[in-house]
Image (cartoon, grey):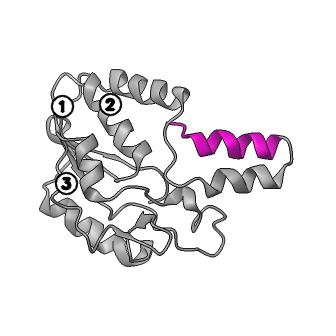
Amino acid sequence: GEASHNAVIASGRLAKDEALVRRGRAMVDPELTDTGREQATALGRELRTRRFRQIITSPLRRALLTAQLVADELETKPRVVVTSLHTENGMVVDGDDVAGQNCQRGSRGKREIADLFPSFDFSHLTDDTWEADAEGSFGHPLSVDERLALFEEFLHRVGAAKDDDDDDATLVVGHSGF
């Protein structure tokens, strides 16, 4: 769903105001807007009868809340697993004007997030995979390219990489990128 930085960036682009675009990208770990919450709830309603065994989500606020809102609408209650392996990490990537921006960084450590989402499984989010930088924002220390194989291995470990079976699916919720 739409997050608050998206609305600020879109307004800046519409007004041709580069400072406003930069302000949107500078927001650390933006929350969902009301529209984003409505979008996540609508997605959950659309998927209501699908049987998801698990939802895998990024530890960023907008992804966590999206996962929660979707899960709340489902007839079955899947476990929600949090991992930073498919999270942007704040590293600059050539040709990507969003990568490396603060809006791709987390604002809370594992304990704070776990307190907000106590029913989620945080066992796959460790201090060495969700670390704070000098400014106190969080991200995975490896580049996206370095994490792709690790994410694929993770999917196998948690039983997500199975044959297409509508009764045993895994839903992956991210906030951007891979």
Residue 106: in magenta span: no
Question: SS of the residue at dot 3?
Answer: loop
Range drawn in magenta: 1-14
Please report the residue visible at 66 percent of the width from the left and 50 percent of the height from the top: 24
- Say whether disc 1 or disc 3 marks the residue closer to the N-terminus: 1
Q: Dot 2: within a 10 Å radius of its alpha carbon, few (fewer than 14), some, or many (20 or more) residues?
A: many
Q: Which mark is residue 51?
A: 1
Whether tag 1 and tag 3 are in contact, CB under 8 A, the answer is: no
Q: Image height check: is 124 above or below 6?
A: below
Q: Which mark is residue 9?
A: none
1 vs 3, front mark:
3
The overriding secondary structure of the stretch rendered in magenta is helix
Q: Which residue does the numbered mark 3 point to in the structure image? A: 122
- Expressed as whole percent of the image width and height from the top left, the position of residue 3 reads 54, 40
Task: Name the amino acid type tagged 1.
Answer: Arg
Q: Nearest to the eye among marks 2 and 3: give it.
A: 3
Looking at the rendered image, the disc whose residue lies closer to the viewer, 2 or 1, is 2
Question: Mark 3 or mark 2, which is nearer the start of the sequence?
Answer: 2
Q: Residue at x 25, y 41 (%)?
A: 117
* Sooner in the amino-acid sequence: mark 2 or mark 1: 1
Q: Residues within 10 Å of mark 1 (few under 14, many from 20)?
A: some
Q: Amino acid at mark 2?
A: Val
Q: Quadrant of the C terminus?
A: bottom left
Q: Position of residue 32 (x, y in %)?
A: 49, 37
**CB under 8 Å between discs 2 and 3:** no
| Residue type (three-letter) at the residue carrying disc 3 | Phe
Callout 2 secondary element: helix
